[in-house]
Amino acid sequence: MLKQTCFMLTCVLALLALTGACTNPALMEVDRRVSYSTRIYPAPKYGTLRLSDEQVSEGTYITIYANPEPGYILKEIILQPAVGNPSTVNTPGPKYSAQINSHNAITATFVPKNAGTYTVSVDPAIGNGLIYPEKLSESGGAVLRISVIPGEGYDLMDTSLKVTSANDGHIIAEPASLPYTFTLPAEDVKIEAQFEKLAPEAFGARAWKYLSAGQYDTAAALYEAAYQRNKSDPELILYSTFARLGNLLIDPDVRSLLGTLSLFTVPSTLEDWVCDDLYWTGTESQQWYTGYAATIYTPEDATLPRINSRISGFVTPFGDFDFSQQSGRDHLAAGDTRPTREKFKNLMFWILISSYRSGFNPFIERVDRYVFGEEFEAIVARAATLPGNAQVPLNPRLKAQFKLDEIYGPGETDIGKPEMDYIIGTLLAVKGMFDYLLVYDWTIDLRPWLMTEIKVSDGLDAILEKMFKLQESNETHKSLWRDPATVAQMLPLKNNFLRVRDSRFMDKAKSEISKALTMTNASMDYWFSPTAGNTGQFITAAKTSRQWVRAGLAQAKTAINGGILYFPGRLPTRAEADSFVWPAAGTESTSYGARVYGVNMTKFFTPGTFTLTNWLTTELGGRAPSLFKVEWYEDRSIYTRPPVFTGNYQLVTENIEGNGHEENVAGTDNNAPYGIYSFQVNTKNFKEIFPQGFNQFGDTALFYQVFPTIPLWPWEVTYFSGLNRPARKLYEYYHKTTVDRN
């Protein structure tokens, strides 16, 4: 049940995502964070530190820049919280990002350099801007980059950037153009420079210069300054809007939100997000997800892997994109070769459970408030001022970094309103889906699940069995299981999980998604249809590979006002894209044989459609799912073969106990019984929601009668076993107010 429903929602989200709020007074603030101060104390010897901020809200990040004296290197940065033990971080520098959760004193240890290496220091007297080298030490002959971050309204004075000898001060190099680089000689060096006040009329040209060099943070600041001086220039409207969107990623509140997802190495700059391979100051062996690792707090009762993920700056509209993933703990079976993308999704599910112990309402509210709040509304308003006939040159660096030549072809390219609407429309669709989630109540306490050695590959049956074993053992958290109220918080039908919380968000969600589809469809029409003055249409190859996207968006735009949205069981890979055709009603995709599903958009946007009492048949006044005994078996000689249903099932009308309620279904070829209990789907409701059917095994009758699988992970088909657990335990917790735990 969970798998199919999540899959449906994923497909709808994926369709909307392929197109590339002010705080609601009805919601209570759930994270009133305090402000903490951070200072450098004691002052380190043989080097200096600079902080990006000294007063920040709880959970936000600061950047620490290290600058050793000539002949010294950074050994470690030390964070001393007001209460607790210090944390030591070994880092090659020169910058490091730390999450602040208390008052802190920060210092560093600088030590003499290693033999055979030479140091790079920066003049500490430089003001009105920041300069830092790619590395603090390296062998002679290495080519190093210099990053320049001007202060607001300032830029580097021409001919002022110099690399000098730390021994006698003679000039070694005078980098004159971006990206600034120099060859490190066989001696320690020092970087000198001056920043000067920039004339306002020069902001735009300087912004283009920094953008062309991959200096995205500096370009963003200059474009914003240029826009404030001239709010009618199409180029400044477009690029300053893009810059503000990018700056959402490094907003302290958004970075704190991402930090709750165990993306504890959230970048603090746009350069670190984009990871531009040509100009970025990182290295292949030290991406931002390792280079900025700070102190890592993992709850003692959690058994989660630590997730580190570099997210590419350009995600193609195909289903074969993978996230780069590292795991700090091994919770996967040896030799596991499942796709990285699936691991990432499942690990993220566990992280949400760990970070939001009382349910997902706080997370959804924070996304709505911080990502799609007042700043996002201001960005949308600015984007709307871009003239419809604007033709703005696309910066070559952006075109190369985001591989836009695959869409527009080589050479110079102009962009304008269609590109802006496509991006804003995509984000509006995502915002609409979060507003959709705000309709429902996501209160649930899954903390006890994290107190066992649960693996990513475990299905619901295995998780429940491990969970219930705790009450019968001498585990530390045994007392939790003696309290029926604690367990009841985990059982969805005993709490408020998926009940309607605020139906007012439904109209808002539908309006935003409808507006998003209007915008993205208009962009697609522009790119696919030649018109006078259209210099931004797709090249033939791009049209061919994205024709199915255009068709899907068009169908979604039509269906959202009361039709049926049809979509495939999976999106095509890049190799399948050219021949893939978006499915219509009652069809199977002939391009790669995927099953076609349909969702009734009227039902989808009706508050309460996805409450559990609408999903399942229930008893006890809707407080418990109706449990059925199902006869079926699996063929273990063929791992990928689905279970075989014998056609027999019956309602459980009394407590599950004893062998009389355990069915052994005979099979052939080493078939073995695997489990016999399941819930019943509300047939009428599901037929209305999914008129095309929605069953992965192709047996619609089975799905609409008794649904035998409740998988938690895409690859793990799981069932409720009988006899002692977990089906009997689950039955007891739903049907009894007090259960003997002794």
Image (tube, grey):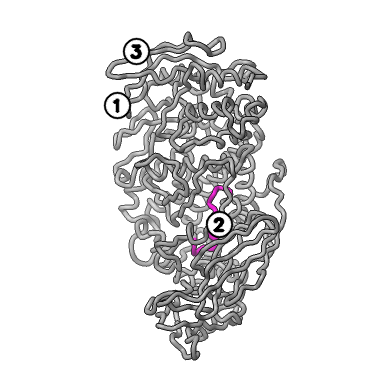
Front residue of this view, candidates 443 and 486: 486
Q: Is residue 339 magenta?
A: no
* Mark 2 or mark 1, earlier in chain: 2
Callout 2: 10 Å neighbours few (<14), some, many (20+)? some
**Tag 1: amino acid:** Ile
Secondary structure state at the residue bearing disc 3: loop
Left/right of residue 325 with respect to residue 99 in the rendered view: left
Left/right of residue 435 with respect to residue 559 in the rendered view: right
Rendered position, 679 above or below 124: above
Left/right of residue 735 with respect to residue 707 in the rendered view: right
CA separation, marks 2 and 1?
A: 46 Å
- Which percent across, then down, holds residue 711? 46, 29
Rendered position, 29 above or below 659: below
- Which percent across, then down, holds residue 553? 44, 42
**Could you tell me what secondary structure mostly forms the magenta stretch?**
loop
Secondary structure state at the residue bearing disc 2: helix
Callout 1: 10 Å neighbours few (<14), some, many (20+)? few
CA separation, marks 1 and 3?
A: 17 Å
Secondary structure state at the residue bearing disc 1: loop
**Tag 2: amino acid:** Leu
Who's the residue at 66% across and 25% down the image? 484
Quick check: can you spot residue 599? no
Q: What residue did someone put label 1 on?
A: 638
In the rendering, which numbered label is found on residue 249?
2
Which range is magenta? 260-272
* Mark 1 or mark 3, earlier in chain: 1
**Tag 3: amino acid:** Ala
Q: What residue did someone put label 3 on?
A: 666
- Which percent across, then down, holds residue 690? 47, 27
